[in-house]
Amino acid sequence: MTYTALIIEDDEGTAEEVAEIVESLGHTCESASCMESAKRRLSASCYDYVLLDLGIPVRSGRTMHRTENGINLLHHIRNTPTISATPVIIMTAHGNDGPEQAVELMRAGADDYLAKPFSRSRLRLDEIILRLLAKRGAPAQERTSLRPFEECELVFFPDRVELNGVKVCRGRGKTRSILETMRARRSVGCYRYFSAAQLAEAAEAKRGQQAAVEAISRFKKTVQSKMASERGIDCQSQDVIEHDQTYGYRFSSMITDRDAIEQDVPAPKMHDPANASARTGDDLGNGADDPVNDLATQARDPVNDPATGQRDLVKPTAKQRREWVLSELRRGTKLRRPDVEKQFGVSQKTATRDLQALMKERMIEFVGHGGTGHYRLARKRR
């Protein structure tokens, strides 16, 4: 049986942490950040339980956060016939969880409560949820037949990312940029943490860190679903990407990453010579998925478009482009991504990939913000 929870929490970081705990139990969830939004959702959908933060605003954008708002919403739930029996777990800031408030909450109809941050609570949130569902007579979760998640390899192809042979990311959008950035490791070998703001900047997300958070959440759900359906593996929320409220996001220790190599790429299809005149640059049997020379991407770049009449130009390899970047930076040039695009006539995605590869190798670094920043040679860390 699949349970659905409503998370009522105005802090994005806490809401995501709660969502990950809920999803780790195999449940689904929706969220609301204020009283108005919560009431609207409660009237439109049926939830198996509610996780309610007391200090929420009345409406989105309001700055007054009162514990009374959460208590009033609890009264609303208990006094509305259609949702009065819905279990409610209260989440309250540590220091506001004294015995007097506990008595008040239980009288108001709360089923249980715990303090935030959750590390200070005697019980874990998932334990409280399962205990509550069992108490309410809900059937205990059946043991899954899926195998537990173990060490997996994340392989980066030019057009996709695969986790143990399962395609978990397509194309070269925001999610791919975030995953490429998170490949960076510390000097001791473990993966680095990145804040949502840093990942949003790397992905050039117009909506900022919220877009990065949403992209990571979608990626996690895709991984969980595909690993279960295609590999019979039970992948939990933190198995691939870990999240820490203080430090941010990073790949878990169970993940290894690498770029695709020739053995990973299927042999190119043979073509009929009689139809050679109809073939494009992607069909010439030159290793369309070769991650070293990246000819598939180059074939799509304007400089290599057969329609431009420039098919005889020598195509610069990724190595040549990256050597040029390093050469320019050694000369003191404040290089930006459009400079690489203009120099080689490549797409934005190709230029971004070249620069990210050099950053991953800690040869260059980005300074400044967004469109006003530039790249420079990485400074040696002491």
Image (cartoon, rainbow, N blue to C red):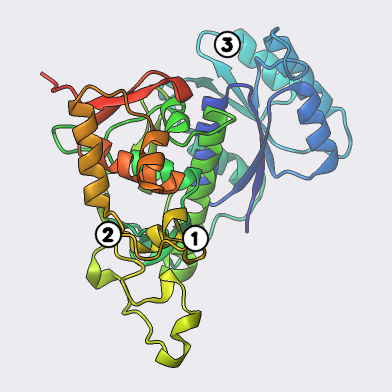
Query: Between tags 3 and 1, which lies in front?
Result: 1
Relative height, residue 314 to residue 361 (above, below): below
> What percent of the width, then of the height, locates residue 257?
26, 52
Q: In this view, does 54 lie to the left or right of 40?
A: left
What number is the disc on residue 293?
A: 2
Q: Residue at x 42, y 40 (%)?
A: 178
Q: Residue 308 carries which label?
A: 1
Disc 1 element: helix
Eye-nearest disc, 2 or 3: 2
Q: How far apart are marks 3 and 1 (CA)?
A: 76 Å
SS assignment at label 3? helix
Foreground: 145 or 179?
A: 179
Q: In this view, does 68 lie to the left or right of 178?
A: right
Extreme right residue here? 81
Q: Which residue corresponds to mark 3?
A: 99
Amino acid tagged 3: Pro
How far from the left and from the top, in percent, is residue 130?
55, 43
Nearest to N terminus: mark 3 or mark 1: 3
